[in-house]
Every structure is written in structure tokens, then in C-alpha cells.
């Protein structure tokens, strides 16, 4: 089925797409608390007052992406769960909301998806109908997003399916343990356990690790930990819009507040989810907020974000730290996109973003 023939499907998948991005609670039946402005953090010495304005949808993107950019804020974006049961309910609703998009991606690309376990960790092995000749001995390892709390089970594997489809490469997507039951370091422990299993079967130079949002952060944290433990590193990584700093200190946290129609602002559920994941640990711990770590010795990296992304600064700062450490690092910033919107299925911009990642992997994997 062609991309154009999915136009009607895209409209039907509007809700599930926003859930699939790993950055909204659109299906959550929680009351939204209206906020007209974002106040600077306590202790800010200088602040610029901006006039109120209307922000048009850019005509420099595809019609399908214009619909995504024009969408309202997700209902419940700043309604913060008060207990573990409510967080778990949100996780269940995120999985249900993502299901239509997951099914459509699998069908569109003709993917085979097998659920299994590695070192006791649930994973999804995703195999495209046709693997590209250069990828026959390669494997891509996917870590899903969702603020360390959302998209359990197959719901978290959508980005891995997109990568398998566009990149024509076998992918293993990790269904790691999540908060509130399993805060840090459970997710990272699971990622490292799966990585250890895969190292016994594959040449690390022929493997890459990738993921978006929390998955992007865990990708970076996995490299920090592998370095610390003397574990072989992958040949390349692709952290997308990583939650690299759980102190929420980057410039675009304020500059893109209420411009991003996915995360919306630092007052969102995602901030609370990050705190839930970190628990009693220092959020500046590099294994939690990877921006605070040493990036020397990292594998080549390609980072992806958007001009309206609340976490654009996290992505840019990570890219600069990699470059300052002498690491080969590419940065693609996509027009008009809020947090993780390059995961919107079947849009031209999505194909372009994954095409860049695929080419980067082709250039750097053995």
C-alpha cells in the first residue's frame, strides 16, 4: 500500500498516533488544568517578556504533518497522577490507544513480530519481509519511549517496527520494566541484560541501539554504563529527542513551552514521570540524566528533534557534548515538529527521518 493511500488511515489514527509518540496522554480520562503561561524557574535572574501571539501552522511541511502540528494539546497533559494505581491505569490506556497504529504499521510493512524473552526480559523480534543485503548480519536494538511509565508490551515496539520497515533490518525491541513498580535502575538493568545476550550472538560493530524520548535517554545511559563496565559498545546509536536532563534546564524547555503540542511544557505529566523514575536518586546522575556524563569514547551518533520540540535543547546539548568529545555525531532537526512527531506513521517526513538514520547506520556499522 502506498504512502498516499494511507491518507485516510492517518486521519483515523490521529488519536493513536499521538499516543504512539510516547509523549501524550490523549486517551487518559483525566481533567486538564488550563495554564495560560509558563513561569520561569525560581532563581532566574533575567527573563524576556514576550507579547501574546498566534502561532500559525507552517506551510513548509506536508499536509499530513500540518494536521499533526495543528492538533490541540493532549487532554490531561498536565493532570498528574496521585498514586501508583493511576499511573498504571495510564499505562494500560496508552497501550490500548496505540494498538491501531501498531497494527497499521505491521500490515503496511509486512512485518513479522515475535514475542520472546532474553535474560528474562520480554522483547519483540521484528523482521521485515525483505532484509536489505547489507543488513543481513546486522541487528538494531530498540528502546521505547513513554516517560519510563507508558507503552508496555507491543505498544512500545512501534518505533522499532518503523525502523525495521524503513531500514529493512531486523530489530529487537526491549519491553523493559517501568515505574512506578520498577524505578531506576530497573529499565537500564533490563537494557543491559538484553545487550549482554545479543553480544553472544552478534558482532557489536554490526549492531546499533536507538530509541526516542525516554528511549533516547536510555540509549545514551546504556553507553555510559557499558563504558563503565567495560562492555563492548555498538557500532552506532540513534537517540531521538532524548530526555537527557531530568533537571529540565535546557533553553527550549521555556522557549518552546506551549509551542510543543505533545509535551506542552515542563509542568506536564512527563516531568512527574521522570521524577517517579529517578526516585530518591540524584537527577544529575549520568545514568539517569546522560547529559551530565563523559561522552568520550562514544560510538557515532545521529540525533533527531524538531523545531517545536520542548526537548530540542536536550538534543542539541547532547550533540554538542558529543562533538566536543571528538565523536562523529549528526543532528537532524525537522521542520515544525513537536516532541517525537517524526514517529507519526506514514508521513513523508517520517520516511525522510528514518532514511537519514538508515543511511547513518549504513555508513558506520560493519
Image (cartoon, rainbow, N blue to C red):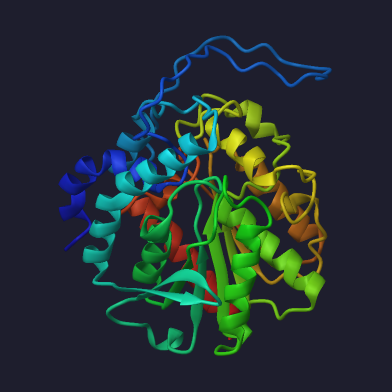
| Residue 107 position in % (x across, y down) | 21, 65
| Residue in view at x 16 percent, y 45 percent | 8
Asked if residue 34 lies left or right of residue 253, the reply is left
Q: Is residue 174 visible?
A: yes
Question: In this orientation, which residue lies closer to the viewer: 27 or 120?
Answer: 120
| Residue in view at x 26 percent, y 68 percent | 109
Dividing the picture into quadrants, the one containing residue 229 is bottom right
Asked if residue 243 lies left or right of residue 9, the reply is right
| Residue in view at x 37 percent, y 26 percent | 72
Vertical placement of residue 348 versus 256, above or below: below
Asked if residue 3 lies left or right of residue 304, the reply is left
| Residue 32 position in % (x across, y down) | 44, 20
Vertical placement of residue 328 versus 144, above or below: below
Dividing the picture into quadrants, the one containing residue 206 is bottom right
| Residue in view at x 44 percent, y 74 percent | 171
Q: Is residue 240 visible?
A: no
Amino acid at each position: 500500500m502506498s504512502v498516499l493511500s494511507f491518507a485516510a488511515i492517518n486521519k483515523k489514527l490521529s488519536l493513536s498516533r499521538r499516543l504512539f509518540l510516547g509523549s501524550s496522554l490523549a486517551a487518559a480520562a483525566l481533567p486538564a488544568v488550563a495554564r495560560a503561561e509558563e513561569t520561569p524557574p525560581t532563581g532566574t535572574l533575567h527573563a524576556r517578556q514576550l507579547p501574546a501571539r498566534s502561532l500559525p501552522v507552517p506551510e513548509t511541511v506536508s499536509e499530513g504533518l500540518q494536521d499533526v502540528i495543528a492538533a490541540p494539546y493532549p487532554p490531561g497533559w498536565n493532570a498528574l497522577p496521585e498514586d501508583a494505581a493511576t499511573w498504571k491505569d495510564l499505562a494500560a490506556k496508552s497501550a490500548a490507544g496505540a494498538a491501531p497504529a501498531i497494527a497499521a504499521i505491521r500490515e503496511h510493512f509486512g512485518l513479522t513480530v515475535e514475542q520472546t524473552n532474553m535474560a528474562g526480559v520480554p522483547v519483540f523480534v521484528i523482521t521485515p519481509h525483505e532484509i536489505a543485503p547489507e543488513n543481513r548480519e546486522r541487528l538494531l536494538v530498540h528502546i521505547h519511549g513513554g516517560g519510563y511509565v507508558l507503552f508496555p508490551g507491543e505498544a512500545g515496539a512501534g518505533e522499532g517496527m518503523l525502523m525495521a520497515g524503513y531500514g529493512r533490518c531486523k530489530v529487537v525491541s526491549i519491553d523493559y520494566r517501568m515505574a512506578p513498580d520498577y524505578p531506576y535502575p530497573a529499565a537500564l538493568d533490563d537494557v543491559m541484560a538484553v545487550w549482554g545476550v545479543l553480544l553472544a550472538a552478534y558482532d557489536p560493530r554490526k549492531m546499533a541501539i536507538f530509541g526516542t524520548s525516554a528511549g533516547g535517554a536510555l540509549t545514551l545511559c546504556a553507553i555510559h554504563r557499558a563504558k563503565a563496565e567495560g562492555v563492548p559498545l555498538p557500532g552506532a546509536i540513534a537517540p531521538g529527542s532524548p530526555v537527557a536532563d531530568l533537571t529540565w534546564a535546557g533553553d527550549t524547555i521555556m522557549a518552546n513551552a506551549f509551542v510543543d503540542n505533545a509535551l506542552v511544557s515542563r509542568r506536564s505529566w512527563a516531568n512527574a514521570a521522570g521524577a517517579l523514575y529517578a526516585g530518591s536518586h540524584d537527577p544529575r546522575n549520568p545514568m539517569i540524566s546522560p547529559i551530565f556524563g563523559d561522552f568520550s569514547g562514544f560510538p557515532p551518533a545521529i540525533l533527531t528533534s524538531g523545531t517545536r520540540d520542548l526537548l530540542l535543547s536536550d538534543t542539541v546539548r547532547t550533540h554538542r557534548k558529543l562533538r566536543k568529545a571528538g565523536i562523529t555525531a549528526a543532528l537532524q532537526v525537522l521542520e515544525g515538529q513537536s516532541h517525537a512527531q517524526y514517529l507519526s506513521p506514514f508521513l513523508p517526513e517520517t520516511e525522510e527521518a528514518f532514511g537519514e538514520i538508515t543511511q547513518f547506520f549504513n555508513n558506520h556499522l560493519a
